Amino acid sequence: MASELAFHLAPNNLSTRTPPIGQALSWAKQYVPAPDRPLLDISQGVPGTPPPPVLRDALAAAASAPGVFGYGPDEGEYELRKAVAEEMRWTYGGQDKGSGEVDVNAEDISITSGCNLAFVAVAMSLAQQGDEFILPVPWYFNNQMTLSLLGIKTVELQTYAHDHFLPDPERCAALITPRTRAIVLVTPNNPTGATYPPSLIASFASLARTHKIALIIDETYRDFIASSPPHYLFHSPSSRQIAPEHQPTDWSWRPTVISLYSFSKSYCIPGHRLGAITASPALLPALVRVFDCLQICAPRGAQRAFLTKPSPSAKSLLPSLRHFIKDNRDALAARHKLFRELLPRRWKIASSGAYYAFVRHPWKGRGAREVCERLARERGVVCLPVAFFVAEQGGEGETEVREEDRYVRFSVANVDDERIRTVCERLKEAEEVFGWELD
């Protein structure tokens, strides 16, 4: 039995919510699986496929390569920063069509121990206790938890199902105060899956510039957008690709924009903890102060693995992995289509994209948390309620379930097509056996 601590814990820590994934997995532990009824975990945004063999081989070789056992530069290996910038020019330039029109250089890039640490470093660089960040709701819970730990106030920008959970810049403008330090967007979004159009992102960039605050864009899932570049903020103003609504007038991105990225989803390596920040070099000294205390340097083996040259003319491994990313993107799009086709008709998809589908459950007067708990314990389907992505509700006397309390996040990336079929079958079973009133 654990003994009581003889010392105090930090109030900011104690007021921060418990990590939600562990709560969902505790429900799952009460399910008794059978060979023909396994547990189906579609809760966490985890790649359902391993990295390609060429990357696995590179990681294995780099792990024991000379030079990787010591510290590296706080901001990351320069050659990898160069390679990431080149890959960004390709991605945002519409592949080879306009990469020369994208203004991103190695000096704009820093490499981090995952995207969560990237957000922590940026938050610690921009704000102190009592300052404010604006987050669209539902939010990515680790972003809000970080702000809570740091004593930074989270200001809620509510989004709505009838708007497909797209945030409204006018509503955001009304929330800005003298203590506001940043607006945070996650696109494609976690948890809703909504992909923000370039014109909407440009509107937020204009708003942030007007108020002299940062626009932080978490682009962890950017490689799962197939239709167009994620946005045009990194383009030179003279670019031929830019429509007027895609970039503010007289635009320069470096004074305003901070972009975050994760290698975890695109390259299927969440365990190797590699992320990146794209920001003005003027921000780097502040970031390095944080890096030197929290990470010193990002994992060197993983960094070196991406610097493997698959051919004499190659500069890094990244261009050779584009086909792998495309294949995963196509497979995930097909899985979303299958999910839409097989989902029982009473379950309503409000938004979807990248790894996630955000779905309204069919039971009247039941919050999604209660639904998800029963699905995990009784049906062996682990998914996350919207309650994990909003402020924790106080007051045990509250019994009324609002419409916005009925949403569930499914991570369709976690499982293969056959398990998507089984998930939908079990959701139908739940309608029949839970004994609750249906819509």
Image (cartoon, rainbow, N blue to C red):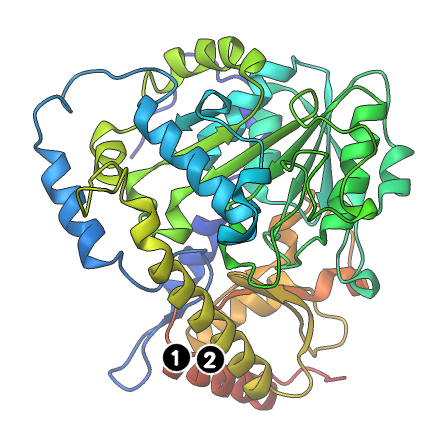
Q: Amino acid at mark 1?
A: Arg
- Residue, disc 2: 423
What element does badge 2 sit on?
helix
Residue 421 makes an appearance in the image = yes
Which residue is rendered at x = 59% and y = 81% of the image? 340
Q: Which mark is residue 419?
A: 1
Within 10 angstroms of label 1, few (less than 14), some, or many (20 or more) residues?
A: some
Q: Pick the quarter of the image with the N terminus.
A: top left
In the figure, 180 relative to 62: above or below?
Answer: above
Residue 47 visible in the displayed image: no
Front one among 317 and 345 = 317
| Alpha carbons under labels 2 and 1: distance apart | 6 Å
Q: Nearer the viewer, residue 139 or 164?
A: 164
Residue shown at 61% from the left, 63% from the top: 227
Q: Is residue 283 above or below residue 389?
A: above
Find out whether the residues at labels 2 and 1 contact each other: C-beta distance under 8 Å.
yes
Q: Left of 399 or right of it: where is 58?
A: left
| Image coords of residue 314 (percent x, y) | 25, 42
Residue type at mark 2 is: Val
Quarter that holds the C terminus? bottom right
For the residue labelled by badge 1, is the local secondary structure a helix, a strand or a loop?
helix
